[in-house]
């Protein structure tokens, strides 16, 4: 899927505040995020358990960010830092990650939330913003549907899928060593498409 975004650093998505949580901004990762990224991965068993290994030090984090930037330029993955613009850190306080990964005939979404920000709807609000963007920035031919995959025992991620209208599609059998347990595939289709589920909107 080719990049159509001329000014990648300027891409910015927003999720409004809730009664209990501040607004979110989603923007491409920057090298300046490296220290916060290392801090997020430090001592977080949930991230270790449910996601690919993350950077453990700043040089590795800078390399990771550069990889995301190359992903944007190549049109292979569109990764966003999710931040709360609360004035506590330049560029916002890092609270999560959301990514769109195009594939032939579909695209996959992924996400995580920093441990200190879990339980206040960061992931569903970020995923809803990413979903709206994916169905706006890309054509129905490029992104006819969005797939969301999680391990069967990751109930928190299953809740995020449900809150954002990603309907359960199938159980995927385990494929060790990369996928040691069965997984769920959830699907969101474009509103108005055949098979569209209930009206979208995070219910966090
Ligand atoms: C899954 C994850 C992204 C959810 O993010 P979030 O921003 O906390 O999302 P929500 O606030 O909507 O919470 C979702 C569920 O997490 C659980 N949860 C709530 N508070 C929590 C907390 N403080 N800590 C951990 N999990 C919590 C609840 O089951 C909640 O569902 P509920 O709203 O029905 O009670 C987050 O737990 C995470 O980053 N986990 C590790 C990485 C991961 O699993 N990524 C997804 C891979 S497929």
Image (cartoon, helix red, strand yellow):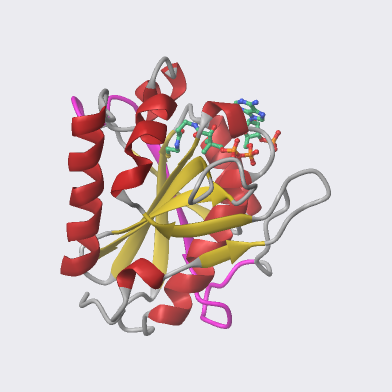
Residue drawn where x is 37% and y is 42% of the image: 33
Left or right of 125 on screen, residue 108: left
Please give the range of residues in magenta.
Answer: 176-197
Q: Is residue 24 visible?
A: yes
Which of the 4 image quarters holds residue 183?
A: top left
| Residue at (20% x, 77% y) in the render | 2
Task: In the rendered view, tell whether residue 43 sits above or below residue 80.
Answer: above
Quarter of image, ligand 1: top right
Answer above or below: position of 175 versus 30. Answer: above
Dividing the picture into quadrants, the one containing residue 3 is: bottom left
> Could you tell me residue 164's position as x and y percent?
60, 56
On whether residue 190 falls in the magenta region, the answer is yes
Image coordinates for residue 169, horizontal then vertical, percent? 46, 54
**x and y percentages locating residue 74 in the rendered image:** 16, 67
Tell me, yes or no, if residue 182 can be seen here. no
Which residue occupies 47% across, 80% down? 136
Residue 188, percent from left and from top = 50, 64
Is residue 145 highlighted in magenta? no
56 with respect to 200 (left or right): left
At x 44%, y 60%, the residue is 27
Q: Nearer the viewer, residue 160 or 153?
A: 160
């Amino acid at each position: 899927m080719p990049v159509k975004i001329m000014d990648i650093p300027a891409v910015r998505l927003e999720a409004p505040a809730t009664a209990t949580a501040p607004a979110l901004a989603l923007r491409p990762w920057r090298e300046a995020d490296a220290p916060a990224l290392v801090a997020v991965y430090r001592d977080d068993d949930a991230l270790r358990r449910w996601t690919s290994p993350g950077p453990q030090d700043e040089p590795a984090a800078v390399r990771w960010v550069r990889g995301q930037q190359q992903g944007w330029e190549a049109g292979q993955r569109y990764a966003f830092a999710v931040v709360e613009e609360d004035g506590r850190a330049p560029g916002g306080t890092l609270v999560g990650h959301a990514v769109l990964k195009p594939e032939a005939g579909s695209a996959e979404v992924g996400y995580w939330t920093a441990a200190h920000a879990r339980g206040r709807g960061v992931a569903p609000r970020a995923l809803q913003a990413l979903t709206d963007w994916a169905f706006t920035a890309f054509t129905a031919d490029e992104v006819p549907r969005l797939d969301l995959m999680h391990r069967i025992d990751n109930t928190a991620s299953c809740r995020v899928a449900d809150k954002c209208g990603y309907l359960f599609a199938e159980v995927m059998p385990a494929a060790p060593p990369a996928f040691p347990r069965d997984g769920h595939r959830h699907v969101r289709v474009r509103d108005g498409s055949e098979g569209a589920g209930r009206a979208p909107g995070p219910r966090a």
